[in-house]
Image (cartoon, helix red, strand yellow):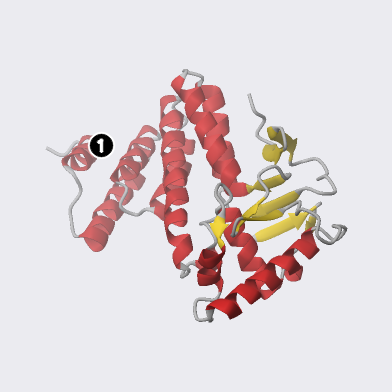
């Protein structure tokens, strides 16, 4: 079982677990991309030091950590209106300044510890001690599904709860209009909604009606057309003898479906409503 207060970091020998509650190492780099972007080196926040182009460059490198990014692609993302030669110079300067910030003691010409430039591509060093919140979130979601698949529901729920707590907000909310962030944002939102749905189902199986309500509130807040979440809300309130609240959520479901996608609740939702209120 992986403790809920642990996080993933990558070293030369592969993934390792490091305690978030402990003091970070002097050379560990932590990157937060859920909600607002934040970078920390050895526990010290770097945001103000990154500069106007170092900040977006580090965002892009972290978001694409699993594959090298061609120099021209980076230039297009960061300086779409620049001439190729000017863009190349700007990228070289931005990368140099970012390396200098992250690696103040590096000898001139020595290989980079954090940022690599190889065969015309840039990337974060895959062997460096870097922790990224979105990587940790996805890894924990996979671990939770493995627990669930083997019937270890207690540990599955703990891991799902860890994922839910990591999701501080949508991916790079300050960059909502940047094209390169759109697909990744929706992918991570899907992971988050799937985890909330699984948590709600596990809580329902354990007759933890208050938890079902709490998780379903978050689901419909993120996706107001999720009928399954409305049904679970109605069921949970009904189990708690709160039929007025169940009826209120049915009304919200009907209103949101009509407003957002121009449709009415499904037969399953209507049948549940009628069974709760014994409509003949």
Residue 42 locus on image (x, y percent)? 81, 51
- Give the x, y percent position of residue 180: 47, 63
Give the residue at the far front of this rendering: 119
Seen as rendered, the residue at the extreme left is 280
Q: Is residue 217 visible?
A: no
Does 29 appear above or below 38? above
Residue drawn 58% across the image and 44% down it: 135
Is residue 228 toward the left or the right of residue 198 in the image? left
In the rendered image, residue 116, in percent from the top left (x then y), is placed at: 68, 54
Which quarter of the figure is the C terminus placed in? top left
Q: Which of the pair 192/79 is nearer the observer?
A: 79
* Residue at the spot 53% in from the left edge and 67% down from the top edge: 72
Q: Is residue 21 left or right of residue 173?
A: right
Label 1: few (<14), some or many (≥20) within 10 Å? some
Residue that lies at the very extreme toward the top in this rendered image: 151
Q: Which residue is mark 1?
A: 276
Which residue is at a point 41% across and 39% down the rendered structure image? 197
Mark 1 secondary-structure assignment: helix
- Between 82 and 25, the one lying in front of the other is 82
Q: Is residue 100 left or right of residue 9?
A: right
């Amino acid at each position: 079982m992986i403790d809920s207060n642990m996080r993933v970091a990558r070293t030369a020998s592969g993934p390792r677990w490091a305690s978030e509650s402990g003091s970070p190492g002097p050379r560990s780099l932590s990157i937060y991309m859920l909600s607002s972007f934040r970078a920390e080196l050895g526990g010290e926040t770097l945001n103000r030091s990154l500069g106007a182009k170092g900040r977006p460059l580090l965002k892009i490198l972290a978001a694409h950590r699993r594959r090298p990014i061609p120099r021209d692609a980076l230039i297009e993302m960061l300086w779409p209106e620049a001439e190729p030669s000017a863009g190349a110079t700007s990228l070289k300067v931005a990368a140099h300044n970012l390396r200098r910030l992250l690696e103040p003691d590096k000898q001139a010409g020595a290989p980079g510890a954090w940022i690599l430039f190889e065969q015309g591509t840039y990337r974060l060093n895959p062997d460096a001690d870097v922790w990224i919140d979105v990587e940790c979130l996805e890894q924990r979601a996979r671990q939770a599904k493995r627990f669930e698949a083997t019937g270890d529901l207690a540990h599955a729920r703990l891991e799902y709860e860890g994922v839910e707590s990591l999701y501080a907000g949508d991916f790079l909310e300050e960059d909502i209009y940047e094209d390169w962030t759109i697909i990744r944002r929706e992918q991570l939102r899907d992971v988050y909604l799937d985890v909330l749905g699984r948590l709600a189902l596990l809580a329902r199986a354990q007759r933890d009606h208050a938890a079902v309500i709490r998780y379903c509130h978050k689901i419909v807040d993120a996706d107001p057309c999720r009928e399954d979440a409305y049904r679970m809300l109605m069921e949970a309130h009904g189990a708690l003898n709160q039929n007025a609240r169940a009826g209120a959520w049915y009304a919200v479901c009907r209103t949101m479906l009509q407003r957002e996608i121009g449709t009415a609740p499904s037969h399953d939702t209507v049948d549940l409503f009628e069974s709760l209120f014994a409509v003949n």
